[in-house]
Amino acid sequence: MAKVTVVGAGFVGSTTAMRILQRGLADVCLIDVVEGLPQGLALDLAQSGPIERFEVSITGTNDYKDTAGSHVVVITAGFPRGPGMSRMDLLTKNAAVVSEVTRRIAEGSPGASIIMVTNPLDEMTYLASEVSGFPRSRVMGMAGILDSARLAAFIATELKVSPLSVEAMTLGSHGEQMVPLARQATVDGKPLADLVDAAALERLFKRTQSAGAEIVGLLKKGSAYYAPSSAVARMTNAILGDTKEVLPVSAWVSGEFGISDVYLGVPARLGRRGVEEIVTLELDGAELEQLQIAASAIKSRCADLRL
Ligand code: APR
């Protein structure tokens, strides 16, 4: 049975563990610095097994020895955003946590793929890649699937259709410099741009760009976790199941879209070896420009990280 370690037993980490177990994807090791927290959650989750009908196991621990030999490591450790806080405010705080966690994880699971969830996403993905020394293809970040799902959910609500009729894709960075792709947004195969006016399209895109902040503002304490954990489970399934699905993730770009040497939200083929290919889509001039602006902003923030 495959093994997935989830680092951070907070809201995102514990719901990720739950989704992986309920889908029977792998045995899970849940680790946190807080004593008792991962152990307690692991017991609770294991006790849902006879009802949910899963046979995979879960261990809660504070000891990195228990994470050894993982195939996938999901990093959610760190601090979530508070109201009014940008993902960038988290940069320094979470960089220290992510460096430490990555170092410990890489020792015991040198063959793992790392899925970063901690924000600011693209920068933390870069940091984990540098600290782990893993091939870039085995370090990636979760954002695009979540942002695309948020856009699809808003479109479904706006047009009063099933979310299953909607296809949508966002690229770029996870945040204000997200790039929603108008031509990839369809409802039952029809281009969204033919179904709503330009103002509605703009409104849907803007709401998607600040969808995380909208939730933070409502919750007052903490940030989103149900949809983020769904997105992580989808990536985990693609890697462990070697599905070769093309999904938008934060991946290392080397020349695609005229952009190099940065982790950025792009369509990527996921399989057993991690990101197996970056799939280039045809973008219009404005989209390409937005993507390049997002890439340079991420690059300059990464340059500020003291590794
Ligand atoms: N090692 C392991 N766990 C840690 C460490 C560390 N060095 N530092 C903090 N943690 C744990 C905390 O103890 C806490 O249980 O990380 C967990 C974070 O959980 P929450 O505070 O509930 O945050 P959550 O909502 O899960 O978000 C985690 O994901 O979406 C992003 O922006 C979000 O960066 C944030 C991350």
Image (cartoon, rainbow, N blue to C red):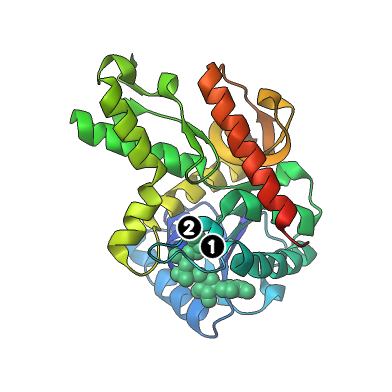
Residue 305 place in picture, x, y as percent = 72, 59
- Residue 187 vs 56, above or below: the answer is above
Q: Quadrant of the N terminus?
A: bottom right
Q: Which mark is residue 121?
A: none
How dense is the environment of label 1, judged by Cα within 10 Å: few (below 14), some, or many (20 and up)? some
Q: Is residue 218 above or below residue 303?
A: below
What element does badge 2 sit on? loop
**Is residue 69 found left or right of 4 in the rendered image?**
right
* Residue 115: x %, y % from top left: 61, 52
Helix, strand, or loop for circle 1?
helix
Label 1 CB less than 8 angstroms from ligand 1: no
Residue located 28% across and 61% down the image:
218
Identified by mark 2, the residue type is Ser
Identify the disc placed on residue 89.
1
Question: Is 282 or 82 nearer to us in this picture?
Answer: 82
Which quarter of the rendered picture does the C terminus lie within?
Answer: bottom right
In the image, is the residue at mark 2 within 8 Å of ligand 1 by its beta carbon? Answer: no
Q: Quadrant of residue 59?
A: bottom right
Q: Is residue 200 left or right of residue 271?
A: left
In the figure, 11 relative to 205: above or below? below
Residue at image x 30%, y 34%? 203
Q: Residue type at mark 1?
A: Asp
Q: Quadrant of residue 151?
A: top left
Q: Nearer the viewer, residue 276 or 98?
A: 98
User: Separation of disc 2 and disc 1 at Cα?
Assistant: 5 Å
Residue hosting label 2: 86
Residue lying at the far bottom of the rendered structure: 35
Q: Is the residue under label 1 in contact with that under label 2 (CB below 8 Å)? A: yes
Q: Is residue 245 visible?
A: no
Q: Position of residue 265 (x, y in %)?
A: 58, 38
The answer to whether residue 196 is left or right of residue 136 is: left
